[in-house]
Image (cartoon, helix red, strand yellow):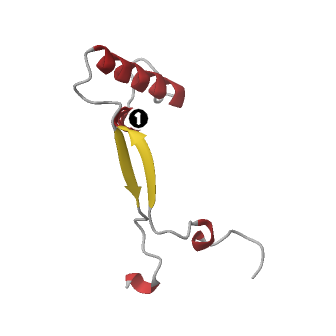
Amino acid sequence: MGGGYPSPRSVLPERQGLNLHYTRGELLREAICFALGKCKIQGRKGVLSDSDRQAIARAVIENLRQHGDRWNLDAPVEVDIRPTWDWSRHGK
């Protein structure tokens, strides 16, 4: 086997699933950043930059915090990350 790219199996962790710990506010902030990824702003060329999207998402979360904590934004959430692809032959 020559040089080249490593196989995806060699880069993946041995465990099949990862548990990532976030708060509800952090997950909402990431979802807002993702949703703003392709939004075009009238009068601007292209889309929002990553720093602009993050600033908007932070402002939204802070605004929600100012209106009480009925959304429970500081509650911990465990996100189970599992691979969505099938590396077996022929999908079996």
Which residue is the extreme one toward the front? Answer: 75
- Picture residue at 42% right of the left edge, 17% below the top: 43
Quadrant hosting residue 69 = top left
The x, y position of residue 41, in whole percent, is: 39, 23
Residue 45 visible in the displayed image: no
- Picture residue at 37% right of the left edge, 49% below the top: 78
Residue holding disc 1: 26
The x, y position of residue 81, in whole percent, is: 42, 57
Please state which amino acid type lies under the numbered disc 1. Answer: Glu
- Picture residue at 28% right of the left edge, 30% below the top: 72
Residue 46 visible in the displayed image: yes
Using the image as rendered, state which of residue 24 and residue 56 is in the foreground. 24
Using the image as rendered, state which of residue 19 and residue 41 is in the foreground. 19
The x, y position of residue 85, in whole percent, is: 42, 69
- Report helix, strand or loop for mark 1: helix
Which residue is the extreme one toward the top? Answer: 66
Query: Image height check: is 1 above or below 8?
Result: below
